[in-house]
Image (cartoon, grey):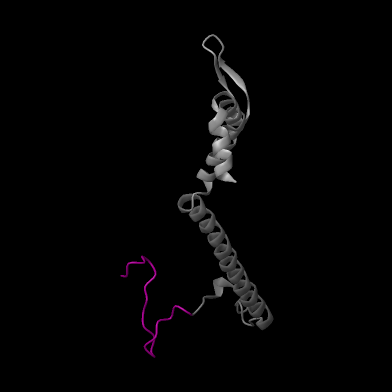
Amino acid sequence: MSMAGDHSIEASAHGQDDWFRHSAEEGLPQAEHAAHVSSLGLGLAFVVTTFGVLAMVIGLSLYFNAYTTQLKATRHEGVGSAEKYTEYRNAALKTMRESKAVDRENGVYRVPVDRAMDIIVAEYGGAEQANVARELD
């Protein structure tokens, strides 16, 4: 007896198994499945698959290049820190250009550098101012 239970496999007279033989209970034989292959269908499937894979490879390649370029610029070339510096510089320039009383009680004022130089020259200049002006000419 075989492992399959009631069904035993016996070799026929020509040495082959009879698994391919059908009994009358199975009915008429079925038509062969996929007897005719569509060359057009296979060709179309091949072309669509090929171009699909190529499009994905090209698309992923473009995305990867753009992403790594942006990442490199952000991490290594200091693009992000330049924005912070620009904001800081603009705020400092604005502060240096405006006049403001810092401490009125003690007479501390903030004035633009050009204006402060004019005040100092007018206050302490005198004869030295004339000598410096002659040397510069």
Percent x, y of residue 58: 58, 68
Q: Looking at this view, name the residue that lies furthest to the right.
A: 40
Residue at coordinates 54% horizontally, 8% vertically from top-left?
A: 105
Magenta stretch prevailing secondary structure: loop
Residue 24 is a magenta residue: no
Q: Looking at this view, name the residue that lies furthest to the left.
A: 1
- In the image, is 12 to the left or to the right of 69? left
Nearer the observer, 53 or 46: 53
Is 68 situated above or below 57?
above
**Which region of the structure is painted magenta?**
1-20
Residue at coordinates 61% horizontally, 68% vertically from top-left?
A: 55
Percent x, y of residue 121: 57, 29
Quarter location, residue 129: top right
Quarter location, residue 67: bottom right
Is 9 situated above or below 56?
below
Nearer the observer, 117 or 9: 117
- In the image, is 33 to the left or to the right of 6? right
